Structures are given as C-alpha cells and as structure tokens.
Amino acid sequence: MPTTHAPAKEPGGRSAVRTLTRLWPYVRPVRTRLFSAALVAIVASCTGLVFPLVLKWMVDGPVADRDTGGVWLGALLLLVLGIVEALLFGFRRWLVARPLAGVEAAMRADLFRHLQRVPVAFHDRWASGQLLSRGTTDLMLLRMFLAFPLTFLVVNGATIVVGMVILLAQEWTLGLVLLAPVLPMVGFLAFFEGRYAAVARRAQDQVGDLTTVVEESVLGIRIIKGFGRHRSQARAFRELSRTLRGTELVKARLLAAIYGVIMTLPELAIGAALVLGSVQVADGGLSTGTLVAFLSTALALRWPVESIGFLLAMSQEAATATERYFEVLDAEPETDAGTGAGTGAVGEAAVASVPAPRRSGAPPATAPALADGIRFDAVEFRYPDAPDDAPPVLSRIDLHIRTGETMALVGATGSGKTTLTALVPRLHEVTGGRITLDGEDIATLGRTRVRALVSMAFEEPTLFSASVGENVLMGDGGNGGEGALDRALAVAQAEFVHALPQGADTQVGEQGLSLSGGQRQRLALARAVVGRPRFLVLDDPLSALDVHTEALVEAALRRVLKDTTALVVAHRPSTVLLADRVALLSGGRVTAVGTHHELLRENAEYAWLMSGGTEG
Ligand SMILES: Nc1ncnc2c1ncn2[C@@H]1O[C@H](COP(=O)(O)OP(=O)(O)O)[C@@H](O)[C@H]1O
Ligand SMILES: [Mg+2]
C-alpha cells in the first residue's frame, strides 16, 4: 500500500500564519501588484457601503418629498456606483492574475529543480504520487489562496470595520446589538481552525496516496493486465478514494457547522436590530431613512462576514499545502563539495581509519591521475532508513578493478549487487571505507566530477520522451555531436536505429515509439558509452532478454567493454565470460575473486549460481 510520505509534523502544533509567511520569498517580487490589488478591492468593497447612504438620502429626501427628479438622480447615482464597483473588482483581478501565475510557475520550477538535486535516498523514501500531488494540487491551492482568500481576508476585514463604524455613527445603540455576536463567533472560528487544519492535512496526504495508485496503475498496466489484477487495483483505488471522500465529508461537515454559526448569529442580531429600530421609528426617535440605511448596511456586511468561514478554510488548506511543499524543499540537496555535507563526517572519520596505500597528500583537483582503476577499500554501506540494529547491506568490501579490466559481479538476488554499483557514481554514499578512482577518493572528487568519469547503465533501461539521438547523447551531457552518436550506436550494436521511421530523430519513450527490451538495452548501452567514460558500471544489462536478443546485446557489450575499466553485474555464464575476472558477492561480502573457470572449480556457491541456481 503506497502510504509512504514524509514524517509529517502534527498539524495541530503549527501556526497557519507562520507557515504561510514562508511564501514571502515567492510573493515578494509581485508584492506591489498584490498590495495595489488589495487596496483596489478595499475601495471597491467600501464603495458598496455607500449605497445605503444614498438610499438614506433618497428615502428621507426625494421619496418623502415625492420629488420624482430626485429619485431619478438617486437611481442614476446608484447605477454609477454599481459600475464603479464592478470595474474596480475587474481591475483587481487583472492586477493579480498574471503575477500569481508567475508565482505558481516559479514555485513549481523550484520544486522540480529540487527533486532533481536531492539524493537518490530521498526518492527511495518518498512515494512519487506524494511528490506529484505537491507539484500540482498543492501549488494550485497556493495560487488560489494568494489570488483570493489572502486578499479577501484583508478586504473583508477592512469592509467589516468600515461598515461597523458607519453603523455605530448612524445609531450606536443598534450598532451595539449587531456587535453582540462577535465574541462567540471568534470563539467558534478559533475552535474550527484547529479542527479543520488537521482534516485538511489528512485530505491532502490522501490525494497524494491516490495519485500514487493512479501512477502505479498506469506505469504497471502490463503487469496489472497480465496478471488479471485490474480488479484488485480498482479495489485499492476505490478504497483510497472512499477514504478521501470520507475526509472531504468531514471537511464539509466542519464547514457546514461554521457556516451555520456564522450565518445564524448575524441574522439574529439583524432581526433584533430591525425590531428595535422599528419601535424607535414608531416612537419618532429615528428617521425611516436612517433605519433603511442601517439595515441595508448591515445586509451589505453579510457577505464579508459569512465569507470569513470559507476564507479561513481555504487559508488552512493553503497552510497545509505550504507545509507539504516545504517538506520537500527542506530536504537536503546533494552538494557538489568534495567531502559532501551530511554524510561527510561519517565518511571522513572512516577514511582516516583506513589504511590508504595510494592516498596522495595533494589536493584532489591537481593530483596526478594514477592509472589505478577502481578500488574498494573496506567499504561498508547501510541504507539511511535501515533500522540501526540491522546488519549493513555491504561490509568490508575490498575489491580492485585494474585499469582496462572488466570485472563481473555475481551474487544471489538481494546480495547487494545493485547497491554496490550505485556506490561508484555516488548515487548513495558509502557509510564506511572508501572507493577510489585512479587513486582519488570519490568522496573528495565531487559528484559532478565522479559522474563525468563514471558512466552507468541500469537494470531497467529507461528511455525519456525524446528522440533516440537525444536519449543517447544524454550520456555525454549533450555535448557529443552526430559523430559521437554514430560511434556509440555502432559500439552498442544499435544500428537498428537507422531503420526506424525517422532514424535517430524518431521519438521514443512514453510519448513515442515503443521499442523492444533488447533495443532499449542497447540504447542504454549506447548512452553509457557515448561520452567515452573512463569507468563503466553496468547493472545487469542483460536482464530479461530472450536468447537471440541476448546474443546481440552481448556482442554489443564485448565491444563496449574493450576499451574501458568496467564493473558489470552478471547472471549468466555467457556474460561472465566477457569479463577478465569475477567477484562473488555473498552475505554482503566479496567472498571470492578469480577467473570464471577458477571460481567454477573452487567455489561451490559460484558453481551453483552459474548452473542456474538463481534466476537467469
Ligand atoms: N533503497 C533501499 N532502501 C533500503 N534497502 C534497500 C534498498 N534497495 C535495496 N535494499 C536492500 O538491500 C539489499 C540488496 O539489494 P540489491 O542491491 O538490490 O540486491 P541485488 O541487486 O543483488 O539483487 C536487499 O536486501 C534489499 O532489500
Ligand atoms: Mg539488482
């Protein structure tokens, strides 16, 4: 069940206002527009409060005097006021629309960039739907908040204050009657705020879970269909969607309750004022015009008061969205510094305690490159989210891959092969010991440098929605031209590309042509070699291929491996034979190193694995 999301703080403990202030850096660039828009809206809203005053003048003047001309004048005045109010509100909308779209875009861009920069371990921990929903639903909520509730909480607050002043000025006794419900209402709102915050957070997290299910269903459609799992998948979806519906209903009930309070109390007060006012008019203590004006002002204030409920609700949701957004943005990105922050301390301490035969004292950038290949020195690794008492996935790994050599890595499923390969390009950081490339510790080399030196192909050959050429040249930071592309395609035996409808310009990936597994594997290999990397790390490039395709990819591999230093995860004897030596990974340790034939003779586990003891 995809319920992984970041350890969320208890919503009750935080203040919505404090959370929302974190939006300021994004709002700052558009603050002038936003403030002017609020000002315009306050003026527009207060224009509405002039209507009752005109009415009062009409009732006490022209209407009482039966002056038709005066009535027409009053009507004309009301019309003009109405048009001015409408124009001002339209102007406000125009003022905010474009800048706020910009704010949303900027926040989304930051989120996307950050997601690219956080370590792989972060993505291991987070369900993709939770990230997706933050980039879509939550950001939309934030834009809506900035466009509407933020402004209107201020505008309606100001309107209520101005209106109350007008009311008190006209007839302070009746004004006090209207003010009576204020205290209980504030109490209710405060209570409601806290409850609503918790439910809003739950609802938004559930949207994230739902997004994850939808995403997995789409990505895994073949498995779902193939195994006839559509019913259970639909059930999982229905389940989550029902939970979400339940949460939304709780939200609606809370909102309904607050609406009930917020609408009833003022109505009661207005009713009381109406009775008291009528009595005063009958006694002659109050003019009819004043009563009309008083009541229409009170009625004009109804919307500003009633709206407070859902404006606060929307603000709560926006606060939750902000919180969810910054949960991602607060995740520590990978730094490119040599001794990376965070894991640096652990790494350094461990390095210091390790005998370092070839460690040069010179700073890494200027150190002369020894042709030393890849060296693992007492490497230990545990996943960051593993329980403290669990044994490390890899421990005391000592392995030396000489320059120009191809080392095959063999081991049972789950023995840590993928993990070991991921350490070389620093997708994960070693938690003990060190890895050197040509004698230089990768921890001090900097990630960009390491990744320029080391090229990878993964078990799952991922193609992006782009042309074949773009997909391959990605391996060269996009620098390589036509020549590099053709060479890489030739080395990876991917000449089939030339027979595609538009050759290397053919669109592939989710939005393009579907390629076979073997074709994708060879493109992934081409991507790995296009930048002529010094070191090559291949995680099982032959996984899940049929025999014919396997032969094709193996031929490709043979040429790829010829002129680099490589570590290749392998399952089958045919792949292992491409390597000069083999390392056997077992129980988190390298238990044997030798040629394929040596190990076959001397190592029972290896012989068992090679005889088909594991998959492949
Ligand atoms: N992201 C991860 N977080 C925690 N544990 C993991 C993660 N990836 C793999 N593991 C665990 O590490 C061990 C080795 O996995 P892996 O390196 O994928 O094995 P192999 O590639 O040899 O099949 C397994 O026990 C697996 O459950
Ligand atoms: Mg693996």
Image (spheres, rainbow, N blue to C red):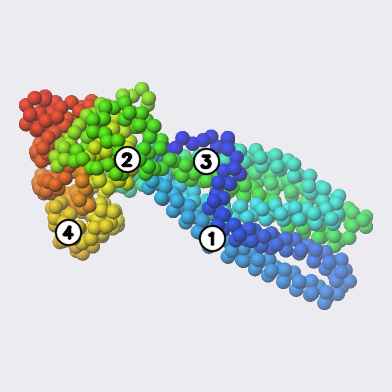
CA gap between label 2 and label 3 equals 49 Å
Q: Earlier in the sequence, mark 3 or mark 1?
A: 1
Q: Quadrant of the C terminus?
A: top left
Q: Residues within 10 Å of mark 3 (few under 14, many from 20)?
A: many
Query: Which amino acid, mark 3?
Result: Arg
Q: Quadrant of the N terminus?
A: top left
- The label shown at residue 99 is 1
Q: Earlier in the sequence, mark 2 or mark 1?
A: 1
Look at the numbered disc 2 and give the secondary structure of its residue: loop
Circle nearer the viewer, 2 or 3: 2
Q: Residue 410's spot in the image, x, y percent?
A: 17, 33
CA gap between label 4 and label 3 equals 52 Å
Q: Residue 512's spot in the image, x, y percent?
A: 27, 58
CA gap between label 4 and label 1 equals 46 Å
Look at the numbered disc 1 and give the secondary structure of its residue: helix
> Is residue 213 something one can see in this rendering?
no
- Which residue carries the number 3 mark? 201
